[in-house]
Amino acid sequence: YVATTRAKRRLFLSLHHEGYRGGITTYNRLSRFLQEPSVLNRLDLEGLEVDSFSGDTLYTKDELLERL
């Protein structure tokens, strides 16, 4: 929470969507701290689709909000 509210220039968020625990597929939920207005107001990913270094998909603020 502190890192998301105090980021000065950039903040990189990552999420491991699913995994296995005891042989069972589990799905991870996004942190409740991502719903804080002070965090959401700082997100600006418009126009970015894929990270050129990692190949990971990047989301716009609206897309991220839909996933919360």
Image (tube, grey):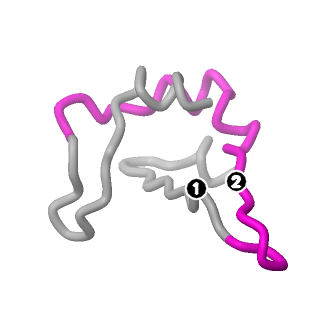
Which residues lie in the magenta part? 20-48
**Residue found at the far front of this picture:** 23
Task: Say which quarter of the image contains residue 60.
Answer: top left
Is 27 left, or right, of 17 in this rendering?
Answer: right
Total marks shown come to 2
Mark carried by residue 27:
2
Q: Is residue 26 magenta?
A: yes
Of the pair 33 and 2, the residue shown nearer to us: 33
- Residue located at (38% from left, 50% from top): 10
Q: Earlier in the sequence, mark 2 or mark 1?
A: 1
Residue named by callout 1: 17
How far across and how far down the image is residue 28, in percent? 70, 53
Mark carried by residue 51:
none
Of the pair 35 and 18, the residue shown nearer to us: 18
Q: Say which amino acid is labelled 1.
A: His
Of the pair 33 and 29, the residue shown nearer to us: 29
Q: Secondary structure at mark 2?
A: strand
Q: Secondary structure at mark 1?
A: loop
Q: Is the residue 47 above or below the residue 50 in the image?
A: above
Task: Say which quarter of the image contains residue 56.
Answer: bottom left
Label 2: few (<14), some or many (≥20) within 10 Å? Answer: few
- Residue located at (51% from left, 49% from top): 7
How far across and how far down the image is residue 52, in percent? 15, 62
Q: In the rendered structure, are the residues bearing label 2 and label 1 in contact, judged by CB atoms less than 8 Å apart?
A: yes
Is 10 left, or right, of 66 in this rendering?
Answer: left
